[in-house]
Image (cartoon, rainbow, N blue to C red):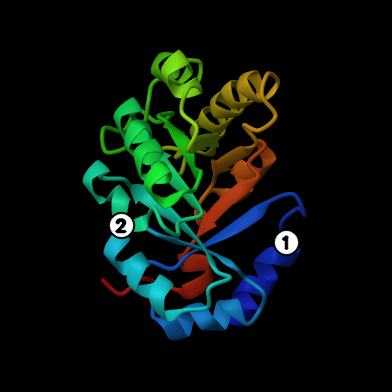
Amino acid sequence: MVNKNILRIISDIPENVKLVAISKTKSAEDIMMAYETGQRVFGENKIQEMSAKYEDLPKDIKWHMVGHVQSNKIKYMAPYVDLIHGIDSLKSIKILNKEGVKNNRILNCLLQLKISKEESKFGLGEKQFKEIIHSDEYKEMKNVKIKGLMAMASNTNEKSIIRSEFVHAKKIFDEINNRDKSFEILSMGMSNDYKIAIECGSNLIRLGSLIFGERNY
């Protein structure tokens, strides 16, 4: 079913929207089923699990860290990670830059904007978000690049709330993108709300259960 699910989703989303297959807790066999359909971007939320899969699976896979990032764990993924989604502090950006220097790489990341009022959601307020983006301290860093914005909507069935939160994120994204075209990724939308996210301008969606089925914790 993994193959069919991937192909159905790909045929259903616009060409400009990239799919991250969220493979946390899923086996190498499950990931390879998706890989065989042409999927090359996978997301994990635990560095230890992602690193083990990186070692075991084809090296043309692009690994995204989609969970909340603990700064003391960044060094373990710095040699190979393609994109880090959930950065929400200047401290973490400094560590990314430091690890980028050590590994002779530019580490790409997304700043997480808090658009939901839920306390369980991480992220920066709009003011803090813009302060980091425009700070001289960040601009001087050569081995880290903020490639865009990541946001998670409220966990609710009220589509109007979800839509208003995504519209707010798109507005902030556009303000920055209009000045800096390298700020190009708007990561919004998961299995329960990705269609609304795409309507609101998302160009990167993160789908797990729609591809792999329920997770095995």
- Label 1 amino acid? Asp
Q: Quadrant of the C terminus?
A: bottom left
Secondary structure, mark 1, is helix
The reply to whether residue 2 is in sight is no
What's the residue at 54%, 42% (across, down)? Answer: 188
Query: In whole angstroms, how far apart are the C-alphas of marks 2 and 1?
Result: 35 Å
User: Residue 190, how many percent across, how many down?
Assistant: 50, 52
The reply to whether residue 119 is in sight is yes
- Label 2 amino acid? Tyr
What's the residue at 54%, 28% (across, down)? Answer: 169
Q: Which residue is mark 2?
A: 76
User: Residue 142, how many percent across, how many down?
Assistant: 50, 32
Q: Which residue is mark 1?
A: 12
Count every numbered label the image shows and give the total. 2
User: Residue 95, how many percent across, how many down?
Assistant: 32, 37
What's the residue at 31%, 45% (across, down)? Answer: 69
Secondary structure, mark 2, is helix
Of the numbered discs in the image, which one, if any, rests on residue 83? none
